């Protein structure tokens, strides 16, 4: 695969999980990659591991907090100073904060907004300015979530940030489209990562059970969507949210004793009536 050879790609929140897999995939595909994470040691280690696995020195660590706008700008400027270009920016950094609406604190909500929304907004703005300056018809991808589509118990604060990202993709797309830059969001469903496995040791089986395709999402599923949105082939796709959730958001819950569910005694009668 060489689609991204010569391209420069920045991914935020990439020391582990989906972001790490994205960096690995872009490096495999020939790109030069800026790997950001708030944790400096994790950031260094992740970049080193990918370089060792791919057999190149194309992945560069840029530690920094995406909630800090000055840090975002410095990160991108340093990356562009070394590569001479920025083609793809993925605002992946996001924090998940579980908690009931009734007990959420201003500090919890502020941090969610600062990382997930404001951080993604200024990541996209910084990237777009650099792409425009260099006349590059770049790609911006925001990492939303199915929790921005369907309400999810104890994820209210997180969910509204993820819903905001879907709208952010549309608004940015509208303002940068005439530079040839596209902006889209991805809404992953339940994805198995180190973090989700730590939160729930039965994560894989639990989510497979409520997902129409019968399996949990894997980081490769999100990578495939991002590679498409970042590709030249996706040049006419902008302002969209690609939902990658195995169908989790297409269904509505039914009562266990619903008369039309298979096996229920009155399901035959229901068929005749229709
Ligand atoms: N895993 C899922 O099931 C899932 C589902 C839907 C959406 N998402 C979204 O995908 C993205 C990645 O999720 P993940 O599960 O891989 O996350 P993760 O928690 O496994 O990894 C996120 C990385 O981001 C880093 N990070 C946290 N705050 C940061 C900040 N302020 N600045 C820079 N880096 C920071 C962390 O240190 C961590 O290494 C997030 O935006 C998340 O909301 C994940």
Image (cartoon, grey):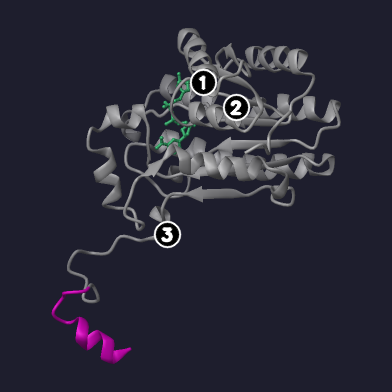
Residue 27 - label: 2
Contact, CB < 8 Å: mark 1 with mark 2?
yes
Residue 218 highlighted magenta (yes or no):
no
Res 183 → quadrant: top right
Mark 3 Cα-neighbour bin, 10 Å: few <14, some 14–19, many ≥20: few
Name the residue: 66% across, 28% down.
Answer: 31
Q: Is residue 67 left or right of 173 when viewed as pictured?
A: left
Q: Residue furthest left?
A: 265
Measure the C-alpha gap from mark 1 to mark 2.
Answer: 8 Å
Q: Disc 1 designates what residue?
A: 50
Q: Is residue 274 left or right of 108 when viewed as pictured?
A: left
Q: Disc 3 designates what residue?
A: 250
Residue 256's place in the image compared with 179, above or below, is: below
Closer to us: mark 3 or mark 1?
A: 1
What is the quadrant of the C terminus in the image? bottom left
Q: Earlier in the sequence, mark 2 or mark 3?
A: 2
């Amino acid at each position: 695969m060489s689609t991204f050879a010569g391209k420069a790609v920045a991914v935020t929140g990439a020391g582990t999980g989906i972001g790490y897999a994205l960096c690995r995939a872009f490096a495999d595909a020939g790109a030069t990659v800026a790997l950001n994470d708030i944790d400096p040691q994790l950031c260094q280690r992740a970049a080193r591991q990918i370089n060792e696995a791919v057999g190149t020195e194309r992945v560069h660590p840029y530690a920094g907090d995406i909630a800090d706008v000055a840090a975002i700008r410095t990160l991108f400027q340093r990356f562009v100073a070394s590569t001479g270009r920025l083609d793809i920016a993925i605002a992946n950094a996001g924090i998940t904060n579980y908690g009931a609406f009734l007990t959420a604190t201003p500090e919890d909500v502020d941090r969610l907004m600062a990382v997930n929304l404001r951080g993604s907004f200024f990541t996209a703005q910084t990237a777009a300015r650099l792409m425009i300056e260099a006349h590059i018809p770049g790609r911006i991808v925001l990492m939303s979530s199915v929790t921005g589509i369907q309400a999810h118990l104890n994820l209210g604060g997180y969910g509204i940030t993820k819903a905001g990202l879907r709208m952010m993709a549309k608004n940015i797309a509208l303002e940068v489209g005439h530079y040839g830059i596209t902006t889209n969001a991805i809404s992953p469903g339940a994805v198995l990562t180190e973090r989700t496995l730590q939160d729930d040791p039965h994560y894989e089986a639990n989510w497979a059970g409520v997902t129409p395709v019968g399996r949990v999402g894997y980081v490769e599923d999100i990578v495939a969507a991002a590679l498409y949105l970042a590709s030249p082939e996706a040049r006419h796709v902008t302002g969209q949210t690609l939902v990658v959730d195995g169908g989790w958001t297409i269904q509505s819950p039914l009562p266990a004793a619903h008369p039309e569910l298979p096996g229920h005694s009155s399901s035959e009668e229901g068929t005749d009536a229709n």
